[in-house]
Structures are given as C-alpha cells and as structure tokens.
Image (spheres, rainbow, N blue to C red):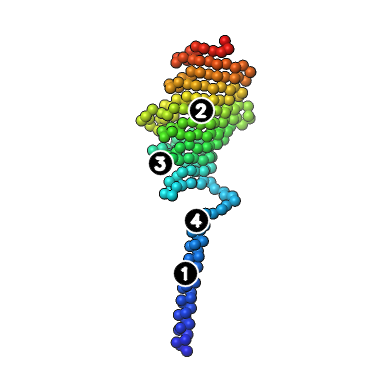
Amino acid sequence: METKVLSQIRLLKVYSAAMTVAFVALCLTAFTRSAQKQKFKEIDAERINIVDAHGGRQLVISNKDRFPEPVANGGELKGMRRVRPAGLVFYDAKGNEAGGLATTQTETGKISLVAFDYATGEAMDLGLEESDDGKKYSASFKIVDPPPPGTRIEEAGAKQQTRIAIQNENKDAQIILADADGKERIKLKAAADGSASIQILDHDGKVVFTAPK
C-alpha cells in the first residue's frame, strides 16, 4: 500500500513539473509574440522614443515637458532651446539631431516650425508665427548656408547666412535673395496695398535697379 502511494506521489510530481514547464513555455511564446508586434487603437504617452536595433535614437515624439535637448557631435547641448515646444525630432545615423517639427505657445502667440539640419547647423525651415488676436502673422520659408568649417555648434546660428527667404507677413508677400555674406541683393515684393516691385541692390545695400521706376 505504501509503495503504491509513493508511486502515485512521484507521478503527481512529474505531472506537476511537466505542467509547469508547459505553462512557462506558453507564457514565453505569448510574450515573444507580443514583443514582436502589438496593435493599439490609441496610446496616451508623454514621450515616445523610436530606436534602432542597438537602441540608438532615430525619432522622438514628445510633449513640451519632456522634449529632448539638441544633440550634436554625440552630446546633448543643454539650454540651447529658447522655448520648450511639443513635437518630434529626427536623428541621423550618428545620433545627432537632423531636423524636426515643433509647435509652442508663447506669451504673445503661437509658433510652429518644420526644420532640417546640416551636420553643423540649420539648413532650412518652414515657419509660422501668429499673435493670439490674429492681427499679426508671418508664414515663411528660409534656406541658409552651413556655418564655416570648424565653427562650434553653439556659435553656428550666428555665423550662418540666410540665402533665400520667402515670406508673407501681414499681407505683404516677398522673396529675398542674398549673397554669400548674407546681404540682400534681390527683392521681389507684392505689398498689401496692391503695389508690386522688384529691386536689385549692390553689396553695400544701394539700390541699382528698381521696377517699376
């Protein structure tokens, strides 16, 4: 009788162990499948980091409180952002900031910006500024030259020259072309009052041609 009981106990232990192994295997399979792909209809998050297979940042989507600092030469540049926007940031293969989309509310109105960067500074941006009362607004597209070689990233903005600017500000639309020194050389304008003009300037800013005269 005792032998039969011991045999049944051993059988129960084996059965229990087998069920445990099967349960663990099932959980691991379910976890692996869920880790590979999950489907959500809606997600609430303060920040989402999209990374590559090695954990390097490729894209960050964030609210204004968790918006990342600029990254250049592999390091964060703390305090470089004048405002804290909500939006997204793109990163290149080296992990440096390569552009992004941002929107924020200031004391006087809203600012929205889409920008793409050179390795050492801003390359082009599409911007919008509008006062809270809607009486003042400006929508623009700007292309700039990269900063001189060897420029510190903190000083890049001050050393870059805007070459092409297209802007509509309070119903005054204009296109400005500048030389390599950032001096305005050609201006095309269609003003809010209906007048239109073309100006060509020399390097010192003197108008050498205008139409209509």
The residue tagged 1 is 21
Q: Which mark is residue 94?
A: 3
**Residue 9, x across and y down, in percent:** 47, 81
Categorize mark 4 by other alpha carbons within 10 Å: few (<14), some (14-19), many (20+).
Answer: few
How far separated are the C-alphas under marks 2 and 1? Answer: 63 Å
The type of residue carrying mark 3 is Lys
Categorize mark 1 by other alpha carbons within 10 Å: few (<14), some (14-19), many (20+).
Answer: few
Categorize mark 2 by other alpha carbons within 10 Å: few (<14), some (14-19), many (20+).
Answer: some
Above or below residue 171? Residue 50 is below
Q: Earlier in the sequence, mark 2 or mark 4?
A: 4
Q: Earlier in the sequence, mark 1 or mark 3?
A: 1
Contact check, label 2 and label 4, Cβ < 8 Å = no
The residue tagged 2 is 142
The residue tagged 4 is 35
Q: Earlier in the sequence, mark 3 or mark 2?
A: 3
Residue 137 vs residue 98: left or right?
A: right
The type of residue carrying mark 2 is Lys
Q: Earlier in the sequence, mark 4 or mark 3?
A: 4
Query: In terms of secondary structure, where does tag 1 sit?
Result: helix
Q: Residue at x 48, y 82 (%)?
A: 8
Contact check, label 4 and label 1, Cβ < 8 Å = no
Query: In terms of secondary structure, where does tag 2 sit?
Result: strand
The type of residue carrying mark 4 is Ala
Q: Which mark is residue 162?
A: none
Residue 194 vs residue 159: left or right?
A: right
Residue 146 visible: yes
Residue 158 visible: no
How far separated are the C-alphas under marks 1 and 3? Answer: 44 Å
How far separated are the C-alphas under marks 2 and 4? Answer: 43 Å
Q: Residue at x 42, y 26 (%)?
A: 159
How far separated are the C-alphas under marks 4 and 3? Answer: 26 Å
**Residue 76, x across and y down, in percent:** 42, 40
